[in-house]
Image: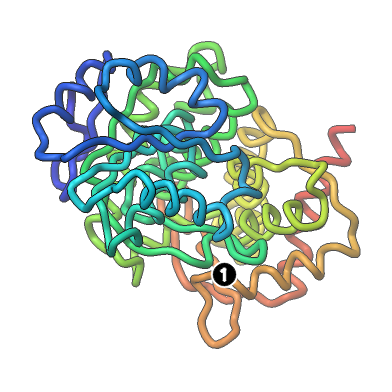
Amino acid sequence: MRQLAPKLTYPVFLIDDLSELLSWIKEQPFSGIRILADENTAQFCVPKFHRKFADNEQFKIISGEHNKTLEACVPVWTWLGDTLTSRNHCLLNVGGGVVGDLGGFVAATFKRGVPFIQVPTTLLAMVDASVGGKVGIDFRHYKNQIGAFAHPKSVFIFPGFLETLPIRELRAGLAEIIKHHLIADKDAFFNLIETPEEEINLIQLIEHSIKTKASIVLQDEQEQSIRKVLNLGHTVGHALESYFLAHHPEQSLLHGEAVAVGIIAEAYLAYVMKLISPTELDNIVSLILRYFVIPVWQSFEDEDIIQLMYHDKKNKSHTILFVLLDGLGKARIDIPVEKWLIMESLRFAQSLRESEQ
C-alpha cells in the first residue's frame, strides 16, 4: 500500500490487494460500514470484499450520468435512515464518477455529514473524480450544479478493478490524463504521443495524474484561482455532455468523451488567440483522435450548446470564461471568448468528424 499524495489532508492509497482496504477500515473507529454501488460494481467489484464484512449494508443505484440527480439521492438518504446509520458509520462509495459524486454528496449532507471513503472503479474516477474533495449532483441537466467541497476519509485505488472495464470506459479515462499532461507536463504529453496504446502503463499514468491534481488542489482547494486549470476542456465538454443528456439520450456520451471534444475545441481557441502553435494544435488533435470519435450534432444545435455554457461555474457577470493553454504544459484561467469564436471552435471539432468519414 503506497500513499500517492501525502500532503493532502486525507490519504490516497494505491493498493495491490483489497485486503489492504479492509485492514485500514478495521483500524478506524467506525461504528459500521455502509456500501453504495451501482448495478455493475455491485456485481463485479463489491463481491471481491463485501463478504468479508460482518453485518454490513449495501445499496445499489442505477449507473449513468442521467441518474446523478437529486431524485436519486432520496432513496439513498432513506436507506441510510432506515438502517440507523449514525455519524460514526462510514459510507464506502464503490464505483465510477457517478457513484463517487453522488455518494460523497449524500454523505456530506446526511446528518450534516457522515464519513465516506472513495473506492473508484473506473480509470476516469481514479485519475480525477475521486481526488480533490468535490462532491455533487447534476440539476436540470446542468453538470454538478448542486454540491459541496467535502473531503473523504480516504481514497483507495485498486487497479485490478480496471480489468472489469470495456475499452470505451478505459479510453474515457485517458481524456483526463491527457488534460493533466497538457496543463502541467508537456514531456509526459509527448511520451503519450509516442507510446502505442498496447504499451501504455496505466498504473504510471494513474500515479502521475493523481500527483498532478493533488499538487494543484493543495494550492487552491476552493477553486478560486489556480485550481481552475483543471477545467481545461470542461467548458465545452460539460455543455456537450449536458446537451446530449437532455436532447440525445439515445446517443450516450461519457464524461471523458465530452471532455476530449472540449480539449480539441478549446485548443483551437488557444491556437486562434496565438497561445499555441499550429504544430501544437495538430499534436493535440492527433492524440485525441487516436482514442476518441467526435460525436455528431447539427450546426443549429451549436447555439443551444453555447447557452449551456452560461451555466458553467467558472463564469463571472454572465460572461463565459475559459481555461486555455498557454503553450504545452501551462494554462491560463478566466479567459473571455466571444460567442462567434466559440461557434467556430465547435465547427472545427465537427469538421474533424467529417474528415474521418
Left or right side of 221 for 238:
right
Nearer-the-camera pick, 56 or 128: 56
Residue located at (43% from left, 40% from top):
181
239 vs 187: above or below: below
Q: Position of residue 290 (x, y in %)?
A: 66, 28
Q: Name the residue under label 1.
A: 312
Left or right side of 357 for 282:
left
Tag count in the figure? 1
Extreme bottom residue here? 317
Q: Position of residue 144 (x, y in %)?
A: 52, 61
84 vs 92: above or below: below
Residue located at (48% from left, 73% from top):
334
255 vs 163: above or below: below
Whether residue 187 is visible: no
The part of the image, by quadrant, that contains residue 138 is bottom right
Q: Where is residue 311 in the image (x, y as percent from the top left)?
A: 61, 73
Residue located at (90% from left, 32% from top):
357
Label 1 secondary element: loop
Label 1 environment density (alpha carbons within 10 Å; few <14, some 14–19, many ≥20): many
Can you say which quadrant of the picture contains the N terminus?
Answer: top left
Residue located at (43% from left, 19% from top):
161
Left or right side of 197 for 99:
left
